[in-house]
Image: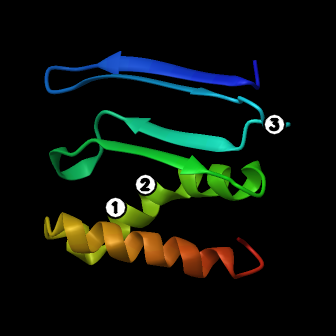
Amino acid sequence: DRNIIAKSDSNEMVKFVACVMKGWASQLNTAIICQKEISNGCSLFGVFDGHSGPEISRFVAKHFKDELEQNLNFTQMNFKQALEESFMAMDTVMQTPDG
């Protein structure tokens, strides 16, 4: 169903449940990241609301993890800086023809 996204999973460190509903909008514009294990022993969760449509939120949800894991600050475990830089990088990518 394209009107609801529901995911749940767990491992020895984390248990999660995520649910997104379409609500009053004409289509579901929200995309989520629910990854209990990425590199550096981290988990990654995100909610991206595509206020003008689903294309951007889905693009970011699809590519954000790779952008984050390639960030030098992430590999050095400076997570706050890595997250900030990765979000800014996604903004930059969205202004290109690929974005």
Question: Residue type at mark 1?
Answer: Glu
The answer to whether 43 is drawn above or below residue 52 in the figure is above
Residue at image location 60% in from the left, 42% down from the top? 31
Split into 4 quadrants, where in the image is the C terminus? bottom right
Question: Residue type at mark 2?
Answer: Lys
Q: Which mark is residue 69?
A: 1
Q: What distance separates the C-alpha of mark 2 from that of mark 1?
A: 6 Å
The residue to which callout 3 is attached is 27
Quadrant for residue 22, please give it. top right
The residue to which callout 2 is attached is 65
Q: Position of residue 42 (x, y in %)?
A: 21, 46
Q: What distance separates the C-alpha of mark 2 from that of mark 3?
A: 25 Å
Question: Residue type at mark 3?
Answer: Gln
Residue at image location 21% in from the left, 26% down from the top? 14
Q: Position of residue 57 (x, y in %)?
A: 64, 53
Quadrant for residue 69, please give it. bottom left
Q: What distance separates the C-alpha of mark 3 from that of mark 1?
A: 31 Å
Tags 2 and 1 touching, CB below 8 Å: yes
Q: Nearer the viewer, residue 42 or 55?
A: 55
Q: Position of residue 93 (x, y in %)?
A: 61, 76
